[in-house]
Amino acid sequence: IVDYLFGKTLALFNVFILLNIVLLGIALIVGLTNPAITINVKAFFMLPLISSVPSIVFTTGISFLLVTVIRNQPISIVLLVGVTGVQLIYYFDQFSNILDFMAFRLSMMPSEMTGLVDMEFALLQRAFYFLTGIAFLFITGFLLDRLAGAKLAQRASLVVGVALLMLSGSIMIKLWQMRRGPIKQREEMIAVNGQWANAPNIDVLSHVIDVKWTGQELASTSDIRATNNSGTLLDTIYL
């Protein structure tokens, strides 16, 4: 049963991978014919693996599971379209992009200086959906009672599916902790800055930062022009 499911999944996977190859080929042709564009060869191999493969596996797994549980393909399609629409319209910028199973909001633009932004979060987020999709396939294999004599294989499918769900659940907890850390830090910074909000302080007239790339590091100079409009002599300045 699991072989049957993975065979269908592989067929769908081949179709979408072929579509990715066509789109990447178009982008490569545009990059080769435009002298103003720099081609990042690693990105052509890395980005499809990060963005497309987990999305294909997750959507395929949840589709098979819904069809098996509901036993009505049109209703399952409507539910999937509805979930996708809700995620794109209402929750596209909520929960720090953890629910972005299509990777629309993840930073996938590589930089020659810094590479991909927040690579650890991107890999963990995509690993969560990849493992969850495979877990759904194994659970679907358990629910498909087509072979009466394959009870042992069905139980093994359930065990593997639950184990993968537990692993993906631990990854989700890690993702939430990664996103809660910076949010908590910002809240603490706002609370600290708020302590001196009403204290006498300077008024910044202008602030110019000049940043240059020296080839190995960033060098910057800062020019601040400020005035004291508090009417009192200041012995401490809060920036």
Image: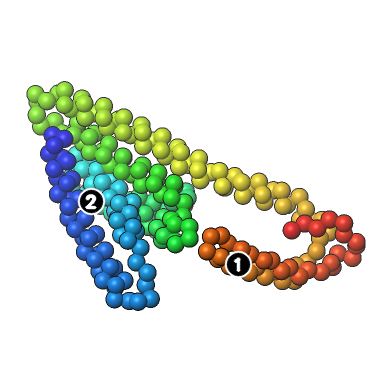
Image location of residue 6, percent across then percent down? 17, 41
**Quick one: 163 or 212, which is closer to the camera?**
212
User: Taking 108 as reference, is 164 above or below it?
Assistant: above
Q: Is residue 93 left or right of residue 4?
A: right
In the picture as drawn, the residue positioned furthest to the front comes out as: 215
Q: Secondary structure at mark 2?
A: helix
In the picture shown, does residue 64 fall above or below 48?
A: above
Q: Is residue 184 left or right of residue 196?
A: left
The amino acid on which the numbered mark 1 sits, given as a three-letter code, is Val
Q: Amino acid at mark 2?
A: Ile
* Mark 1 crowdedness (10 Å alpha carbons): few <14, some 14-19, many ≥20: few
Residue positioned 81% across, 69% down in the render: 227
Q: Is residue 142 above or below residue 190?
A: above
Earlier residue among tags 1 and 2: 2
The answer to whether one can see residue 69 in this image is no
Q: Residue at x 53, y 60 (%)?
A: 216
Q: Which mark is residue 27?
A: none
Q: Mark 1 sits on what residue? A: 211
In this rendering, is residue 127 above or below 86? Answer: above
Residue ID for mark 2: 77
Question: In the rendered image, is residue 112 in sight?
Answer: yes
Can you tell which of label 1 and label 2 is closer to the viewer? 1
Residue appearing at x 60%, y 67% in the figure: 211
